[in-house]
Amino acid sequence: MAKEKWVLDATHSNVDFTVRHMMIATVRGAFHKFDANIVADPEDLTTAEIEFTVDVASVDTRNEDRDNHLRSADFFDAEHYPQMTFKATRIVRTGDGEYDMTGDLTIRGVTKPVTLHVVYGGGGKDPWGNQRVGFTVTGKVNRKDFGLTWNVALETGGVLVSDEVQIHIDLQAVKAA
């Protein structure tokens, strides 16, 4: 395949994360508003141009109080920094349909390099004749690297919220007309 423009199908995509709570349990969350600019040959991502944006106010952990806290200046500060962004700078094939994608992640105005693992799930035509492809992206970041430092020490030792945040993204894209 040649390098072509792909349009994110947000209705068949997910941006999810997990974080440890009180050092004993995992809390799951998602962002519901996101977009991507993708110019790629899905069978060889090494030359792809990929940019991704997430509306941080769309955070959803199934708890309104926690979501409002995450939108506040203690965490994302959505009022002043409404989006987090990722722009790929280097993509290296690590196996059959697998890649390490390094890029600049910006959260709260802080930009740091992050490497994410990408797996090409395959492609095919949908019932309406559109060419579609799918990818799974996983990785982790340290939230403190981006200024998300709020926490509470626990009586038993440890903290309320872990520094490490696990990322899991499922993307489906349609070849642009």
Image: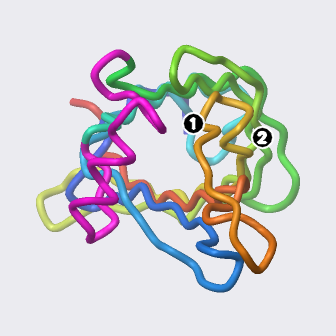
Q: Nearer the viewer, residue 57 or 35?
A: 57
Which residue is drawn at the image coordinates 71% and 46% (left, top)? 141
Q: Secondary structure at mark 2?
A: strand
**If the image is split into quadrants, where does the C terminus sit?**
top left
Q: Nearer the viewer, mark 1 or mark 2?
A: 2
Residue furthest left in the image = 128
Which residue is drawn at the image coordinates 26% and 51% (left, top)? 32
Q: Is residue 87 placed above or below 68 in the rendered structure?
A: above
- The image's colour scheme reads rainbow
Which residue is drawn at the image coordinates 67% and 85% (left, top)? 24
Image mark for residue 115: 2
Q: Is residue 71 placed above or below 118 in the rendered structure?
A: above
Q: Nearer the viewer, residue 71 or 1?
A: 71
Image mark for residue 41: 1
Q: Which residues are magenta?
A: 58-80
How far across and how far down the image is residue 140, in percent?
71, 53
Q: Are marks 1 and 2 in contact (CB under 8 Å)?
A: no
How far across and how far down the image is residue 139, in percent?
70, 55
Q: Is residue 162 placed above or below 44 in the rendered structure?
A: below
How far across and how far down the image is residue 170, in percent?
46, 61
Sequence-wise, the earlier of marks 1 and 2 is 1
Name the amino acid type tagged 2: Thr
Q: Is residue 98 left or right of residue 129?
A: right
How far across and how far down the image is residue 152, in percent?
62, 57
Image mark for residue 154: none
Q: Secondary structure at mark 1?
A: strand
